[in-house]
Amino acid sequence: MAKVHNSKMRMPTILNEDLEWEWMFGDLSEDRITDIAKTQFPSDQMTACTIRKDFKEQLEPTMPFVNEDLLMIESVL
């Protein structure tokens, strides 16, 4: 995810369905929360695309947008 969130060095936690369920509904200890937060979702199972800056105003906000000024994400992943 560093190639996508490179300017602020953010690291999102992406969970699979089992961990998602546990995160939402489990009675978690601090250690378990830390373990889940450190989970690395496999990058080969992810897809990505650029979005419009005004995506919130679009009728189809999830429709991929190709920004010709940027390299395609696939080329840097």
Image (cartoon, helix red, strand yellow):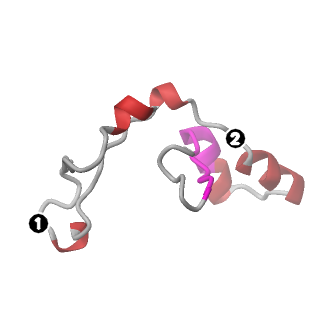
Q: Amino acid at mark 2?
A: Thr
- Which residue lies at the image location 64% right of the left edge and 43% below the top edge? 19
What is the span of residues highlighted in magenta in the rendered image? 9-21
Residue 2 among those drawn in magenta? no
Residue 20: x, y in percent?
Answer: 59, 48
* Disc 1 crowd, CA 10 A, few/some/many (<14, 14-19, 20+): few
Mark 2: which secondary structure?
A: loop
Pick the front one: 19 or 68: 68
Residue situated furthest bottom in the rendering: 57
Q: Which residue is mark 2?
A: 39
Residue 13 among those drawn in magenta? yes
| Marks 1 and 2, the one that precedes in the sequence | 2
Q: Is residue 12 left or right of residue 33?
A: left
Label drawn at residue 59 = 1
Pick the front one: 9 or 41: 9
Q: Is residue 28 left or right of residue 9?
A: right
Residue 7: x, y in percent?
Answer: 54, 59
From this view, report whether residue 58 is shown above or below residue 70.
below
Mark 1: which secondary structure?
A: loop
